[in-house]
């Protein structure tokens, strides 16, 4: 199988449904931007809290280490990545998402509807 590099989309391969079960979770080491709706679905804030002050919510989540930034002009939150680039929600042992059932739309839609190279992924076999 071709070697992929998450930082070089030209090396990515056409996504197939069975990839996730045998992958090292390469896509979970890429930056993840999420919307307020995702923050609510993840249980990180209530709708009332977001509506009252999205900036205060972002400040709290940043202080807790869950997000690394919030862009006011786009209302997008950036989920924190660990020092090895793993997503904040990626289990380091199983390489599975700890919030899979509540995962953000960005993760749900990658790579079929969104991404640098839609329908391609940085698959790396376990």
Image (spheres, rainbow, N blue to C red):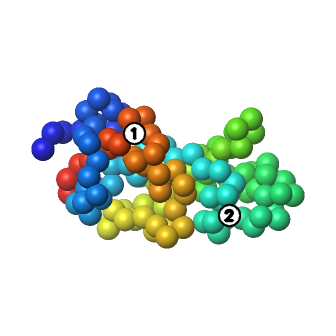
Q: Nearer the viewer, residue 93 or 77?
A: 77
What x and y, as percent, mark residue 118? 39, 39
Q: Secondary structure at mark 1?
A: loop
On the image, which quarter does residue 121 sit in? top left
Residue drawn at point x = 38 percent, y = 35 percent: 117
Q: Is residue 83 above or below residue 97?
A: above
On the question of residue 39 being in view, the answer is yes
Whether residue 62 sits left or right of residue 79 in the image: it is right
Which quarter of the image is occupied by the N terminus?
A: top left
Where is residue 36 shown, x and y percent of the image? 69, 54
* Residue 97 horizontal side relative to residue 69, left or right: left
Residue 58 at x, y percent in the picture: 72, 51
On screen, residue 119 versus residue 115, left or right, reads: left
Residue at 66 percent across and 44 percent down: it is 76
Which residue is found at the position 67% from the left and 58% from the top? 37
Q: Is residue 76 above or below residue 37?
A: above
Question: Of 65 and 125, which appears nearest the observer?
Answer: 125
State the mark number for residue 40: 2
Mark 1 lies on residue: 118
Residue beneath the point at 76% across and 56% down = 57
């Amino acid at each position: 199988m071709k070697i992929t590099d998450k930082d070089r989309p030209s090396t990515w391969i056409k996504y197939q449904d069975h990839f996730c079960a045998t992958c090292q979770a390469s896509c979970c080491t890429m930056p993840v931007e999420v919307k307020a709706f995702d923050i609510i679905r993840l249980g990180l804030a209530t709708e009332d809290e977001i509506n009252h002050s999205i900036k205060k919510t972002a400040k709290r989540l940043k202080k807790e280490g869950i997000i690394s930034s919030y862009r006011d002009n786009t209302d997008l939150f950036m989920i924190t990545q660990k020092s090895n680039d793993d997503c904040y929600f990626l289990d380091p042992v199983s390489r599975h998402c700890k919030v899979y059932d509540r995962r953000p739309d960005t993760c749900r839609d990658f790579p079929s509807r969104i991404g640098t190279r839609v329908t391609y992924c940085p698959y790396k076999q376990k």
